[in-house]
Amino acid sequence: MLKNKSIFSFTYLFLFSLTFFPPISANAQLADTLVTLKPSIVGVGTFMKTRRPPANLLGTGFVVADGKTVVTNAHVLPNDIDVENNEELTVFIGAGKDAKIRKAQVLQVDKVHDLALLEIVSFELPALKISDIGSVREGELFAFTGFPIGAVLGLYPVTHRGIISAISPIAIPVTSTKDLDITMIKRLQNPYDVYQLDATAYPGNSGSPLYDPDTGEVVGVINKVFIKQSKETVLEKPSGITYAIPARYVKALLKDANISE
């Protein structure tokens, strides 16, 4: 009889704890993470007062290290800056009507992994932590936040979730030499693995951080253009697959630039 009472008491306490202390859902954890993460997400583009519209948002970036260093994709950077007409490389901070523009400058570029480091001039933001994990596993769930389709829908960071559906080389051998070009040949000579996601990103998402929904630690950098050109050039209708550059290459680039995390 005593044993039955003990079981009853344990069951009651367990149900009581679920009522007053319910388990934190994955959605709630991501929501909490976004509160601290979104101030570190910036738009990357150019600004020129005499242009209409004056702001040109080209992609996404995120702040790391000293709070002034921004990580983005190299292909997000403009090919030319119209210095004569006072065009400036800029980052866009905040959201909606509270958005602000800050001048930036290029610190380091890694064209092989399509990464770039910028410095925000005379301004600091909260920095994201880059994960020390050497790799991620297929099937794990991650999130990314950025500016899909540029600022067409307004300067509001948008978040997507998806699993790592595959870890595969940036370039794969083609069935015919007619499908090869110089860029493809170079990447086949020095292949490296990238993350393939089952979530849809858009060109403006390039440079977005791929992160752990629970901790906000960055494991990769979303890349919508550079990798697709390598992996899907032979497809008549390229897929909606999204890719990301592993964060270890960001760590290497920071080290090359003598920037402490």
Image (cartoon, rainbow, N blue to C red):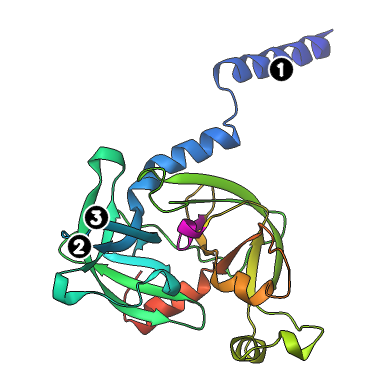
How many other residues sit within 10 Å of disc 3, few (<14), some (14-19) or many (≥20)?
Answer: few
Closer to the camera in the image, 186 or 6: 186
Sequence-wise, the earlier of marks 1 and 2 is 1
Disc 1 vs disc 2: Cβ atoms closer than 8 Å?
Answer: no
Relative to residue 198, is residue 67 drawn left or right? left
Pointer 3 residue? 52
Residue at position x 52%, y 38% in the image: 29
Closer to the camera in the image, 152 or 111: 152
Relative to residue 246, is residue 191 drawn left or right? right
How many numbered dots are placed on residues in this image? 3
Residue 146 location (% of width, % of height): 44, 52
The disc placed on residue 48 is: 2
How many other residues sit within 10 Å of disc 1, few (<14), some (14-19) or many (≥20)?
Answer: few
Judging from the image, what secondary structure is the residue with disc 3 in? loop
Relative to residue 11, is residue 109 drawn left or right? left
Residue extending furthest right? 1
Pointer 1 residue? 10
